[in-house]
Amino acid sequence: MYPPATPPREVKIGDAAAFAGTTPCAIRHYHQIGLLPEPARGGDGRRRYGYDDMVRLLWIRKMSDAGISLDDMRAAFDEARDVGDVLGRLEETLVAREADILRQRAAVQRLRSVGSPLGLLSPMVTDRLSHLPPGALRPADLDALLITERIFGPLGSAVQADVFIILATHPDLRAEADRLDAADAALDDTVHPHDPRVGELAAQHCAHHKALIEAIEAAGLDLAEENLFEIDDAEASGDEDARMSAFEAVTKMPYDFSPARTRCMELTAQLMAVAAQGE
């Protein structure tokens, strides 16, 4: 018969972590935040953990598995807050997590059905473009929609999607857009902002924008936009104040545009504003 094992009076941090099902790094963190009192060090300079320490570690592990935050654990141990309050906060957290999981599952389902990164955008944008054949949208188109959604929200991106619908279905307008993009790229730092080519290109951009608007109206896409505004009003979550403003978002999105290209964009906006006033 083997003699019964004699339990140690104290153990090192590695043994304590192994028994509690955690890590030495986590235990050290508990010491730092005051969740677990730091025991005295032995003659070899190492910490030694006794019975009470192990009990505290086991309770920490149980509460962690239940989803209780470290701050709430500390309050519970200190009896500074009613347990019911802690559990109420935990339930709110779990409800929020459930909502996040539902959103994530919906995003995965959209990705499966769409079969492209388009499924990662909001349902309003995805639905707007779902009828287009595979490959109709270019990576740069998706990039633009992604940025617009970040700055102006799903509604702004869904409205912008009309442009990409027209470009995908009108080869002549797509070809002109490609030509203008190449001309924009040619406005590098070697081109003076007041070079005559800058103004000429701005006028061409304005004419192309007018052609896009006409095509959007001819396709009836502008009328469908009214439904987008109704959907956006119905789905408003009330957290708009928590989202940065469009102006703030624009100032944080970097673009490597030369002075000439920046001036071309400014002139294009001015020409479009004048054209809109004349209509």
Image (spheres, helix red, strand yellow):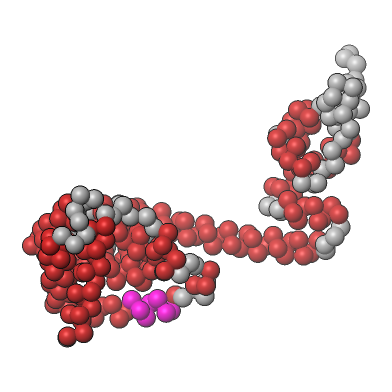
Q: Does 254 appear above or below 56?
A: below
Question: Where, by quadrant of the figure, is residue 142 drawn?
Answer: bottom left
**In this orientation, which residue lies closer to the viewer: 80 or 266?**
266
Q: Kindly give the residue lying farthest to the top in the view shown.
A: 1
Residue 272 % position (x, y) = 20, 75
In the rendered image, residue 11 lying in the magenta stretch gets the answer: no
Residue appearing at x 54%, y 62% in the figure: 99
Q: Does 13 appear above or below 68?
A: above
Q: Does 42 appear above or below 208?
A: above
Judged by its main secondary structure, the magenta piece is: helix
Residue 70 % position (x, y) = 73, 50
Specify the quadrant that holds the C terminus. bottom left
Residue appearing at x 49%, y 67% in the figure: 243
Whether residue 206 is visible: yes
From which residue to which does the magenta span run? Answer: 228-234
Residue 43 horizontal side relative to residue 118, left or right: right
**In this orientation, which residue lies closer to the viewer: 101 or 23?**
23
Whether residue 58 is visible: no
Residue 196 % position (x, y) = 12, 62
Residue appearing at x 21%, y 63% in the figure: 264
Residue 220 horizontal side relative to residue 41, left or right: left
Specify the quadrant that holds the N terminus. top right
Q: Kindly give the residue lying farthest to the left in the view shown.
A: 172
Question: Where, by quadrant of the figure, is residue 147 drawn?
Answer: bottom left
